[in-house]
Amino acid sequence: SRGVHMRWCHNYGGHKIQVRDSPAHCDHMMSVFVELGAVPLTMFGWRACVDDVFGFLASLGYRHGSESINRVDLCVDLPGVGMDAFKAAYERRMFICQSRKHNPRYDGDHDAETIYHGKTNCLLRIYDKIGEMDLHREEVKRQVMTAYRLGPDCETATRVEFQLRREK
């Protein structure tokens, strides 16, 4: 959806819904872009979120024709595991990968660093999840993550995430 004007943008239940300004391939259908939110996905799961969004769109007169998934983020959260071991292994180039593109990024005064490896359509990200939520002041997200994934006593957690995009 980059570079395409969205006529209507709405947050519904923690999900971002955008309707494209240009018509869909059929005149009687809307062209809709949906980004499922992390908090409802964590709390309710993907099926309930998809059903909820489609129900909302149906109440607006949307007729579902087909969908295409443009991006999926697969992740695992590692409660109690810090970034130090990942940074040390990365700096010693202790990884097996066909991709030669890599980029560690450190975030100024904060210790919320991120290691990127790969290309746009298949990107590995390793980062301090708690540091990221604190940096962006995401209190509700942190409470949900603590309750559903990390546990109440978790002070550090690393997220290992693969971002997979459909080729253009």
Image (cartoon, rainbow, N blue to C red):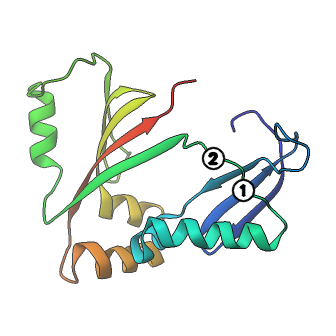
The residue located at (22%, 62%) in the rendering is 157
What is the crowding at mark 2: few (fewer than 14 residues within 10 Å), some, or many (at least 20)?
few
Quarter of the image for residue 159 reads bottom left
Task: Decide: is 42 above or below 18.
Answer: below
Residue 76 lies, in percent from the top left, at 25, 56
| Mark 2, residue position | 67
Task: Decide: is 129 above or below 90.
Answer: below
Amino acid type, callout 1 = His
Q: CA distance from mark 2 to mark 1?
A: 8 Å
The residue located at (69%, 39%) in the rendering is 1
Task: Decide: is 84 above or below 123.
Answer: below
* Closest to the observer, 115 or 124: 124
* Closest to the observer, 15 or 112: 15
* Closest to the observer, 48 or 77: 48
| Mark 1, residue position | 64
Quarter of the image for residue 64 reads bottom right
What is the crowding at mark 1: few (fewer than 14 residues within 10 Å), some, or many (at least 20)?
few
